[in-house]
Each structure stands twice: as structure tokens, then as C-alpha cells.
Image (cartoon, coloured by chain):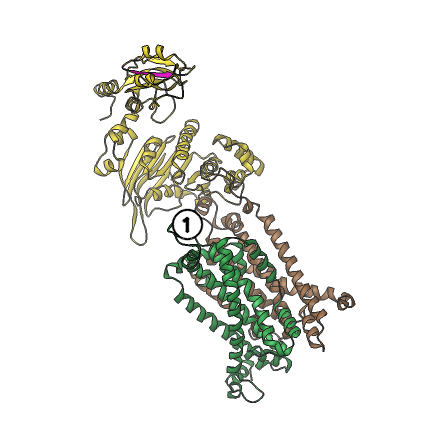
Chain colours: A green, B yellow, C brown
Amino acid sequence: MSIFQQIVDWLTDPAHWRTTYGAAGIPQRVLEHLGYTALAVLASAVVAIPLGAWIGHTGKGGTLVVGIVNSFRALPELGLVILLVLWFGILNAVPALTIALVVLGIPVLLAGTYAGIRNVDRAVVDAARGMGMREWEILLKVELPNALPLMFGALRAATLQIIATVSIAAQVSLGGLGRYVIDGFSNREFDQMASGAILIAALAIAVELVLTGVQWLVVSPGLRKSGARKARATSRIHQMAVKSASEST
Amino acid sequence: MIEFQSVTKRYPDGTVAVDALDLAIEDGGITVLVGPSGCGKTTSLRMINRMVDPSEGTVLIDGRDVRAQSPSALRRGIGYVIQNAGLFPHRTVLDNVATVPVLTGTGKAAARKRAAELLETVGLPAAFAKRYPAQLSGGQQQRVGVARALAADPPVLLMDEPFSAVDPIVRDDLQEELLRLQSELGKTIVFVTHDIDEAIKLGDKVAVLRVGGRLAQFDTPSALLANPVDDFVASFVGRDRGYRALGFLPGHGVPVGPVSSVPVGTAVDTARGQLTDGWAVVVDDAKRPLGWVSADLLSSSGDAVSAENLISGGSLYSVDAESGGTSGSLRNALDAALSSPSGVGIAVDSGGAVVGGITADTVIAALAEARRSGEVPT
Amino acid sequence: MNWLLNNLDGLGPIILTHLWLALVPVVVGTLVSMPLGWASSRWPVARAILVPLSSLLYTIPSLALFVIMPLVLGTQSLEPINVQVALTLYTVALLVRSITDALSAVPESVTTAATAMGYRPIGRFFAVELPLAVPVLIAGIRVAAVSNMGLVAIGQLIGVTSLGLLLLQGSQTSPPNFDQIIVGIVIIVLLALVVDGLLALLGRRLTPWARVGPKAGAAT
């Protein structure tokens, strides 16, 4: 039987879709994967977006952002997850994982928000100030809406980074779709490993598509084209941070 | 000579950019292609160096079809200057200028030596050689662009709106500089602009094109101002063309009369005795005009005529102007008279010293005389 | 720190292996992405295929891609080539988009001037467009090199030995060997920072023109 047939068989085996005592099914693993991801993305956003917006608006601390993004990029995901989970102990594995994921997510979102705000045409901000808007009004009504394309790009990049890192959490006895790869590897079951990999890839692509759709709905139509063009006029920061995201629109 | 022989450019979507253009561009002069946007002037220019190939017709340089050689070989022998200069940001000013000689196989050292000379020719200090384009102002970049186009010493220079992105004062400098360069180099220059004033200032001949790529008129600037062939050309040439046409008539027929002048520092009482019709021009030690005093002004002055307390004068009429532009023309003379507070225009020599005065009446009389003697083109 | 002192001898080879696994894909990826980026900046059709494909590829998490690789390549699942090909794909995916954008961003006046001076398309690419794309190219290579340092460690989860071995071994003893884990993390971070720094230096050497600002008074 070819390996492809084995994978199809594994994926279509009803037993793998049911959660029974002692064995989680695919839907259960997907929910775990999404749960860890959502928690971490949310926590990263709560910290990074206000901070990035503030730094971007005032222009103070920009070099700090570059520094943080630069050094945090170098952290190995696997090392971070293993270290934090073992340190906190298996009982606190989920908070430990979340912290690791947030550490990876914040720099991306921070840089994206910062770059998004800084990229807003200064003439537009000047005009807003000239019309008598207060600083917080400028930030909320002018800068943030204009920064949305880049911020969304960063959000997608951070989310993908987190989904990818959740896949390796199975190494430290956590759930998620990575379980199939890790378990399959230790049991020498390549069909299970490959099926797990395909599920992970499919989940990542699905989430990316959903976020792209949301972005399309949320971002002002006036920015859709120019958003892509601005992303091209890249500053060094979002070259590093937004990596994948913003150009695919 | 550059010849367009019934050249047409039609794009796949059906747009006709240039329509059956016949044009013969003489060697050694500046020929300006001018017209509103969509008149095909840039397209025509770009057909000379095959940046665009015609759909029909032939472009010849010195009787030879431009298609006889490969585009890159052709282009290396033709200078090209564009708006915003298009300098290479990653190369120094010197290496930008040396680009074409290096392409054509001149050694790097020789090319750089030549480039350094050219920087001087276009009026840039040698210290600029090692700078990058980002460190230069727009006007300086454009000078480098001109030097780069001249580097291989091409007989033909194509200029596509080269000065339209710089501010008016810098543009004026660059135009003067181009006229000066051309008087030294005598290249065949084809110059594209949408600015009729630039065309009239720079062109030995001006081709006015209309939308749809048709040639409306090909003439000297003065003939264009005096005798536009139709309403389109007349309206494109613009308002005040009668007045602007005076810029092409020499002012030597205007009699320069005496003008009352007082040196700065003259006692007020003495100065009062010098006024003619209540006015006198105040001059410095070298007899250069500083401004005017009137009877009213003197009565409120202190003991002596002071350089700080004068009525500012109008434009100056140069009696022996050698430089280009309109100085020394009837337009220059009339403007000097009209802009003077006393109604008397100040005539100065090449050193800037006052040599006399002229009035609007004498200018108009000189114009009438010129018309009678057939000096005014009709 | 005892762990570090007791195991100093074994670290050299494993560091070299790690660098080899991480950097060969950067080199190969850079070479492959240049013609692809050129093609996609030149032909809209190529762009319409390559850019979305790159995005899609970049979306797939590394662990998944490592496991899927043998299915595509027909290799055995433990071979390092799986990790290297996967990382090469990421590098290409990242750089193709950067290069496409960088080449498209070269001002039209500059390319027009180059053509008018008699450059042929290939000559123009190497003399003008590629040098102008270098800052973006180097930025992309830096991102790829640094992220590869971390991703190589993940390859350990499917049996491809690298510095990830220190992380896994340290986590599998009871109690966990934190020294070993931390040493692993620190070495990976240091390698990433050193490579990043060297690349940044290279970028500066290649692009002296990118660091000049307009001089005062030269603002028009």
C-alpha cells in the first residue's frame, strides 16, 4: 500500500475523529490548537497594539522597538517552549506555553503597529491637527485606520508564527495537532506523522484565509490598493517583522 | 540633421500618439517640441533613440535610418536627459557621468577624468564628484544629468522636460546654463517641454504639436509669437504675445536720453536743484543705480541723500547686452520705462552704470520705425 | 554551567552541523530567488503565480513542512536534506516577494535613463536594478538566516540532529537539565545574532550610497 493511500486511510478512519477515553480525536486537537493560539494572539495584541500605537504616535522609543524586534527574532521557538513549560512545571503547562507564544507574538505585532502608524502620511496627520483634532483623536480616527493594513499584516504574521509554535508544544506533553507528528515519530508511524502535518498545514492555511477575509472587510476600501503600495515602501522594521504578511493582498 | 518622414505611432488600443509627422531638425541648434499633454511630443522624441519604434514612417539621423543599428548602440551615441535626472542612486556623481564612456569601452580612469571635466563644464564644483545623488539638490542633480548625457560627446542631445521638476528660480538658472553650454558646444538638441515660455526662451526653432500628435506649426519663436497659423497655436502661445514678441526685437533703435542723477550722499538742497520733473536717480560711486528720489521724499529727508531712504527703481534696460534672453530687446526697454516710478526707464551699460533714460513713448516710436523698415516679421 | 564545561568538546561539531543546516538553504535560496524575482517583476503572469505561491508556502508551519518533505522528495524521513529543502523553500518564498517589490520600486526615471544610455536588459539588471535592490535583498536574507537558526532546532523533533539535541536531551532527563537547555538556547541566539550582524555589515559594505542623507541646503 502506497504511503499516500495510508495517509488517506488514516485521515478517513472514523476512529481518529472521535474523542474516546484516553485518546483525543481530530476535532478535539483542532480545538486545542486554536484555543492555545487564540489565547496567545489576544494576549499579544492587548500588550503590543496599544504600546506600538503609542510609540508610533509619539515617535519616542522607535529605536527600542527595532532593538526588541531584532533580538527577539533570534530566540529559538523550541527552546523557549521547552524551557518555560519545564520551568513552570507540567501542571502550569498552558500558562507557560502562552507566555512563550506571547513572547514570540509581541515583537511582530509591536513592530507592525509601530511601522503602520509611522507610515501614515505626515501631511494627513498635520491636516488632522490643523483641523483641531486632539492627539487621541488623531491616533484613533486618523492614524489607526490608516495603519490597519500593516497592522493586519502583522496580526496575520504573528498568528501564523503562533500556530506553528503550538505544533511543537506536543513535545512537552501538551495537546494540539502537533501530537500526531510527535506521537507518530516516537511510534515510527509515518502515516500518523504525515496526516498530522497535513492537518497542521490545512489549519494554518484556513486561519490565514479567514484573517485575510476579515482584513478585507475591516480595512477601508480607500486603503486597499495603497496599503499594498505602502507595504512596498518598506522601512527596515517591517521588512523584518511583517515578513510574510502584508504583500499577499 | 534629424528627419521624421511621415512618422505615425499607433498603440494597440488604437490611440494615435503621433500622426504622420514630417519634421526636419537642423544640426547645431535647439529645436523645441512643445504642446499640451497627449500631443505626442515625448513619443516623438523617444522615437529618435528608439525608446519607441514608429508604427509607420522613418526616422533618419544624417540620412541614416535609426533602425540600421541596434537600439543599445544607437543610444550610446545619443545623449538623453529626463525630468528628475534619473541618476543612479548607487553610484557617485562621477561614476554616474562616466556611465556611457565605460559602456562603450573607455577605460575607467580615462572615463572618470573626462567626467570630472564635464562636471566643471556644467558648473559643479569638483568636490561634488564623490557625492551620491541623494546628497544633491534637484537643480544640481539635473546638472549632473546633463553632464552624464554629454559624457560620450554625442552630436545629438535629447532632453525630455528636463527642467520641469525644479523650482522656477533654479529652472531659470538651468535654462541660462543650457544656452551658455550650447553656445560653446553647438550640439543638435531636441528639447521637449509643455511650457511655451521655456520653448520660446530656449528654441532656435519651435514645433508646436496638437493633441492627437499632429504638427501645428514649426517656426522660429518670434514668428510663432507674431504669426500663429491658427487659433490653437495662438491660444497655446498665450496672452500678451504681442508684448512678448518685443523680446525678439533689438532695442538699438530706442534713443537713450539724459537722466538726472545724483550721487548718494549729496546734500538735499543740492539734490533738489537736480530733479527733472520732480525725480532723480541716485547712483553709487560706480554710477550704478540705487533707486529714485522725488521732491516729496527730499522734503522729508535729513541733510543728505541716503541709500537707506530711496524709492525702489524698476527693471533696467541693458544697452549693450550680449547675454541671451530678452535683455537689450524692445521688451526690456519698454518694461524698464513702465516699471520705473518716474516713468523714465534706466539704461545701463555692461558694467551696470547708468548711461541715460528712456521713455515708453520713445520705445513705441522705435517699434513703429522698425515696423516701417520691415524689421518686424509679418 | 557545569554542563557546559563538561561538554565543551562535543559542542564544536554540533554547532557546525547546525550552521550547515541553516545556512546552505540561505545561499541556495538566494540564488534561486533572484531569477524568480526578476521574472515576476518583469512579467505580470509570473508575478501572479509566484507571489501567491510564496505566501501559501510561507503559511505552512515548519514542523508540518519537514514531515511533508519526504512525500514530495521521496527521501527517508530522517535525512537532513528534508530540513534543508524546506528551509530553502521558506527562503525563496520570503525573498521572491522582497526582490519583486524591490525591483518594481526602482524609479522609472532611473530605468529609463539606463535604457536610453544604451544598456541592454541583462546589463541593466546587473548594473542598475540589482544593486538598487541590495538593501531589501540583504534585509530579506537576514530575516531568513535568523529564522532558520531557530527552525533547524525544530528539525530535531523529526530526528535531524542539530543544537536542538541539547534542548530535547535536557528536557528528557528527570529532573530536567536546565543548564543544557539554556546553553542550547544561548548558543542558537548567539549564532543568529552573529550571522545577522555579519550580514548587516556586508550590506553596509555593499551599499555605501544607502547611508547618505541629503546635505543641508540641498533640499530642492
Q: Is residue B279 magenta?
A: yes
Left or right position of A167 against B299: right
Where is residue B165 drawn, in percent x and y? 40, 41
Q: Which residues are magenta?
A: B277-282
Left or right position of A93 against A156: right
Is residue A175 or residue C57 the one in the foreground? A175
Q: Is residue A203 magenta?
A: no
Determine the main secondary structure of the stretch shown in magenta: strand
- Compared with C47, B243 (above or below) is above
Residue C195 seen anywhere in this rendered image of the structure:
yes
Q: Quadrant of the N terminus of chain C?
A: bottom right
Is residue A98 or residue C189 the one in the foreground? A98
Q: Quadrant of the C terminus of chain C?
A: top left
Residue A243 seen anywhere in this rendered image of the structure:
no
Which residue extends farthest right? C6
Packing grade of label 1 (10 A; few <14, some 14-19, many >=20) is: few
Q: Secondary structure at mark 1?
A: helix
Quarter of the image where one finds residue C73: bottom right
The structure residue drawn at horizontal position 70% and vertical position 64%, both measured from the top left corner, is: C15
- Compared with C28, B309 (above or below) is above
Label 1, on which residue?
A126
Quarter of the image where one finds residue B203: top left
Q: Chain of mark 1?
A: A
Query: What kind of residue is marked 1?
Result: Asp
The structure residue drawn at horizontal position 65% and vertical position 62%, both measured from the top left corner, is: C189
Where is residue B212 drawn, in percent x and y? 27, 45
Where is residue B36 drawn, in percent x and y? 30, 42
Where is residue A160 drawn, in percent x and y? 52, 69
- Compared with B169, C25 (above or below) is below
